[in-house]
């Protein structure tokens, strides 16, 4: 049997490395291997590459270069924001943290860990579209709140959150506001001035895996998680991942420069995929906000199928897709995001996340729709 051509519809999990990123990285994977913290000429070259990347990442979110703290990715940026802000604020008598119920585990789990350390942690509910309930957020925040964390856009259903409103609520109580913009930055405007702390990750926008940043606005105080050589103003010790950081800078700049055009094109592909699947499959529903949603995000619930079986069947048919998030796919756990949105467990069992990207073609969308419909028919037999 011929292997079917592969179609990658999992850009929310990760993206292919962009040419600009690869070109920026290559010298530092070869002859330019110096430690950026050393003093000789080759080290200064590495340092210069980091400075340039810092400027590019800052420009991508309207921040100042000195506000960028490079990390090992979005997970570390989230941990640094949540634990770092909470630990600092505890010394000021604030011992409460408020997060939305649909945060990525890189925010939820540090918050739950803080709860075990004696912090009061509140998980604020969302509505049926996955938008955080602002009245509930307002009620959860008080003079003890150290940090409010609400993601810019959700990784499973794509709902874009009212982050400016959330920030206003946090600040009215004197709390810091953090937003995980890992999924948002590739697709929509992220203005770091909205939040005190903003998490970013390179591999979601054509950069390498294992590098990200936390934007720490001027004057915002948090504690470090890593102690050692004192890199990144003491907020993130550890020898610089020069190639990764250079790749991140190039990818961020290239992404943002063409973002509006790519977002419009990918949204049209996503909408046509939704339409084709709706025509061919009965008992299918779209999750997430009807309009306030990332342009590449298509989260579906398909009645009468079990997500894991569908993903495996699609894999055999050459389609890379996932159920909820990349880290929960493969496990039989139901998506905490869908459950928080009130999706019945029966439907959440059949969740499928399809996320086209900048390289996806019209032909791929048409072929994928046919293969997905066929896989669903097979499972329903
Ligand atoms: N936050 C969100 C919203 C994500 O989607 C992801 C990745 O799946 C992360 C954080 C973690 O980022 P990283 O893979 O760079 O650790």
Image (cartoon, helix red, strand yellow):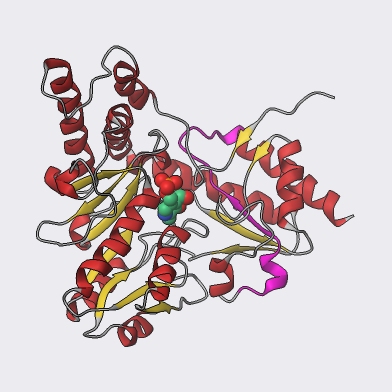
Query: Residue 349 magenta-drawn?
Result: yes
Q: Position of residue 312 (x, y in %)?
A: 74, 44
Query: Residue 48 magenta-drawn?
Result: no
Q: Is residue 78 left or right of residue 143?
A: right
- Write down the region rendered in magenta: 343-363
Q: Position of residue 115 (x, y in %)?
A: 40, 75
Residue at 75% in and 36% down: 317
Residue at 54% in and 48% down: 270
Residue 332 seen in this snapshot: yes
Residue at 28% in and 63% down: 178
Q: Position of residue 310 (x, y in %)?
A: 74, 50
Q: Position of residue 212 (x, y in %)?
A: 33, 43
Tell how many labels.
Answer: 0
Q: Nearer the viewer, residue 113 or 61?
A: 113
Q: Is residue 234 left or right of residue 95?
A: left
| The C terminus: image quadrant | bottom right
Q: Is residue 368 left or right of residue 69?
A: right
């Amino acid at each position: 049997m011929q292997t079917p051509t592969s179609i990658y519809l999992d850009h929310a999990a990760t993206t292919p490395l962009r040419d600009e990123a690869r070109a920026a990285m290559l010298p530092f994977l070869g002859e330019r291997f110096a430690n950026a913290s050393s003093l000789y000429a080759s080290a200064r070259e590495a340092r210069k590459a980091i400075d340039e990347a810092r400027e590019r990442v800052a420009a991508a979110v309207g921040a100042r270069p000195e506000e960028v703290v490079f990390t090992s990715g979005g997970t570390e940026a989230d941990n640094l924001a949540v634990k770092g802000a909470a630990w600092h604020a505890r010394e000021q008598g604030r011992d409460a943290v408020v997060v939305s119920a649909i945060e990525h585990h890189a925010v939820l789990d540090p918050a739950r860990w803080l709860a075990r350390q004696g912090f009061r942690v509140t998980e604020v509910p969302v509505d049926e579209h996955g938008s955080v309930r602002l009245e509930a957020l307002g009620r959860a925040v008080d003079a003890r709140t150290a940090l409010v964390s609400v993601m810019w856009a959700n990784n499973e259903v794509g709902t874009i959150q009212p982050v400016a409103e959330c920030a206003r609520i946090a600040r009215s109580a004197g709390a810091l506001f953090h937003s995980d913009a890992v999924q948002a930055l590739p697709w929509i405007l992220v203005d770091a001035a909205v939040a005190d702390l903003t998490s970013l990750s390179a591999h979601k926008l054509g950069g390498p895996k294992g590098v990200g940043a936390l934007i720490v606005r001027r004057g915002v105080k948090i504690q470090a998680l890593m102690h050692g050589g004192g890199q990144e103003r003491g907020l993130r010790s550890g020898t610089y991942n020069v190639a990764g950081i250079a790749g991140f800078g190039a990818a961020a700049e290239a992404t943002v420069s063409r973002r509006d055009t790519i977002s419009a094109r990918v949204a049209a592909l996503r909408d046509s995929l939704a339409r084709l699947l709706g025509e061919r499959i009965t008992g299918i529903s779209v999750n997430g906000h009807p309009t306030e949603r990332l342009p590449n995000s298509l989260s579906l619930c398909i009645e009468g199928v079990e997500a894991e079986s569908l993903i495996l069947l699609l894999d055999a048919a050459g389609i890379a897709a996932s159920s909820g998030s990349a880290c929960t796919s493969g496990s039989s756990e139901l998506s905490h995001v869908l459950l928080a949105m009130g999706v019945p467990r029966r439907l959440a069992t059949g969740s499928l996340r399809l996320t086209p990207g900048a390289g996806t073609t019209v032909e791929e969308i048409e072929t994928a729709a046919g293969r997905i419909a066929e896989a669903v028919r097979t499972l329903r037999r």
